[in-house]
């Protein structure tokens, strides 16, 4: 590099630094305001979590135990609506939105409606569940798939059951949802997809309960191919 080129580069760097310094000086008040606003937002978020959300979370969890007891006893109406001063899952969801308890209540509520045969409400509430627990998330998807089957909406049923199988990703739940998925494909007369799905149970989950009887399902759909 020539001396002139070096001088030009130094000059450009100096000019660039000068521009940055000029921008900082001219916008100092704005930068301070932005920084202060960010700090304030963080503070508000922390206070919201500790002073508002945490007490609501504790109260919601405390009030939900009776609804869970009704659910365990398969008393779906009381699980949904509550009884004798104890709120059901429906009220927990309505009164304690944005809490983990209300999120879980949406799952319970969806399953309760599914068992009552109110499939649209089941789907709505199961779709409102958004959790990190892969098992519960898979069950929510699978139960929504079951509701779509009852509505004879096989396209959505297949979509949800496939998502449930993928989400579960274990030897206990995945073959259950794959078998249901195969049955949905059969209902759609898509015997090739049903065959592939049943064979995936036999190949990937050979020790599962579903695999023990899957040969009969495979034979049935292959007879139609």
Image (spheres, helix red, strand yellow):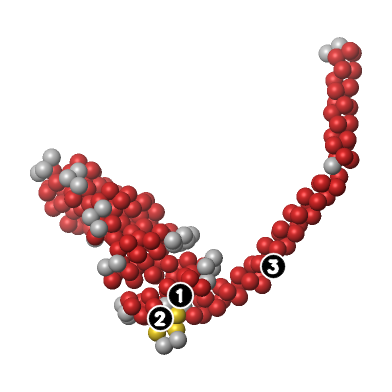
Q: Tell me the distance, in whole angstroms, between the alpha carbons under discs 2 and 1.
A: 8 Å
> Where's the N terminus, which quadrant?
top right
| Circle 1 Cα neighbour tier, 10 Å, few/some/many (<14 / 14–19 / ≥20) | some
| Mark 2–mark 1 CB contact (< 8 Å) | yes
Q: Which quarter of the rendering shows the C terminus?
A: top left
Where does label 2 land, which residue?
82
Between 12 and 219, the one nearer to me in the picture: 12
Residue position marked by numbered label 1 in the rendering: 91
Question: Which quadrant of the view contains residue 10?
Answer: top right
Q: Residue at x 33, y 53 (%)?
A: 160
Q: Which of 6 and 60 is in front in this view?
A: 60
Q: How far apart are marks 2 and 3 (CA)?
A: 32 Å
Which residue is denoted by mark 3 in the rendering?
47
Q: Is mark 2 on a helix, strand or loop?
A: strand
Q: Please give left or right for residue 62 compared with residue 202 in the image.
A: right
Closer-to-camera residue (90/136): 90
Residue 95 visible at all: yes
Q: Is mark 1 on a helix, strand or loop?
A: helix
Q: Position of residue 137 (x, y in %)?
A: 41, 60
């Amino acid at each position: 590099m020539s001396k002139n080129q070096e001088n030009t580069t130094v000059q450009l760097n100096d000019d660039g630094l000068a521009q940055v310094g000029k921008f900082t000086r001219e916008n100092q008040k704005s930068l301070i305001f932005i920084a202060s606003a960010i700090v304030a937002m963080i503070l508000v978020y922390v206070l919201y979590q500790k002073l508002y959300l945490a007490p609501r979370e504790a109260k919601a969890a405390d009030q939900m135990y009776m609804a869970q007891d009704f659910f365990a006893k398969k008393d779906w109406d009381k699980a949904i609506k509550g009884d004798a001063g104890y709120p059901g899952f429906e009220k927990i969801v309505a009164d304690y939105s944005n809490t983990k308890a209300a999120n879980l209540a949406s799952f319970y509520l969806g399953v309760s409606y599914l068992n009552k045969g109110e499939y649209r409400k089941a789907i709505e509430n199961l779709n409102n569940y958004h959790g990190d627990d892969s098992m519960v998330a898979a069950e929510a998807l699978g139960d929504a798939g079951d509701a779509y089957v009852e509505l004879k909406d096989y396209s959505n049923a297949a979509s949800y059951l496939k998502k449930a199988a993928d989400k579960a990703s274990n030897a206990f739940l995945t073959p259950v949802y794959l078998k249901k998925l195969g049955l949905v494909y059969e209902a759609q007369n898509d015997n090739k997809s049903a065959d592939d799905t049943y064979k995936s149970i036999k190949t990937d989950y050979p020790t599962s309960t579903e695999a023990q009887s899957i040969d009969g399902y495979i034979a049935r759909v292959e007879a139609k191919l």
